[in-house]
Amino acid sequence: MGKAGEDSTAATGLGHPVCMLLLPTTCTIAIVFKDLQSLPPATWPRAALFALVAAAVIAVPSDLIDTPLFGRPVETRWIDYVILVVTAGLIGLILAIRPDPSDPDVSADARSRDDTRTIWGGFVSFLAVGCPVCNQVVVALVGTSGALAWWAPVQPVIGLLAVSLLVYTLRKRLQTFRLVACPVPASSRRKAAR
């Protein structure tokens, strides 16, 4: 975003990362798609593999994929499958985009934060698609009828929170990749710091 765009978001209070995530501009969306298109071709098979693993890790215990290991007394909803596909795809992309570990411009702390956000996004996604009466914490707090009356309607919103967290993490990961793929010369960094 240009300098004028930064000033307008700061004046409206929309410069906060959560606001920028929830209210993305056309420019931001275009930059993310451009960054995704510029990824090396080897990233896409890795992303598909990671997405399949993430989908299995989320879908098998929540019984979206029917197995004899787990049961689900409450029927799945169509939104559960949408949340599963979107979050698994985002997790796959995030995990497939790996910055060079030897690059001094990318700190281990930044990579660790991205990985932590990815794990939390997957966990929140699992809560969003899981059976509402199978969540023992929710049942203990509000009972079975409360889980169906209160928790089940909130789950799609929780799914949106998972997607938002993962989109934010993807944006951060793409910025990190951009640093690795197109490092900024030291003289430009000094000028930007002033």
Image (cartoon, rainbow, N blue to C red):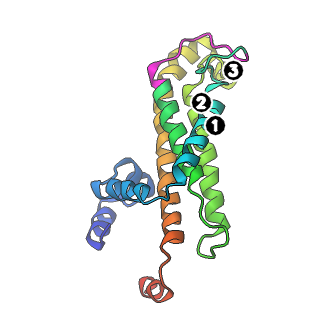
User: Residue 127 at what x, y percent from top left?
Assistant: 59, 30
Magenta-drawn segment:
69-80
Residue 5 in view of the camera: yes
Q: Which residue is denoted by mark 1 in the rendering?
A: 53
Q: Around disc 1, counting alpha carbons within 10 Å, would you say few (fewer than 14), some (14 to 19), or many (20 or more)?
A: some
Q: Check disc 2 and report its element: helix, strand or loop.
A: helix
Q: Amino acid at mark 2?
A: Leu
Residue 38 location, quadrant: bottom left
Q: Residue 16 location, x and y as percent? A: 42, 58
**Residue identifier under label 2:** 127
Kind of residue sitting beneath label 1: Val
- Residue 154 shows in the view: no
| Left or right of residue 71: residue 86 | left
Whether residue 18 is in magenta: the answer is no
Q: Which residue is mark 3?
A: 140
Q: Element type at marker 3?
A: helix
Looking at the image, which is closer to me, 18 or 142?
18
Circle 3 residues within 10 Å: few <14, some 14–19, many ≥20 = few
- Tags 2 and 1 touching, CB below 8 Å: no
User: Which residue lies at the image location 54% right of the left edge and 54% below the top edge?
Assistant: 42
Which image quarter: residue 34? bottom left
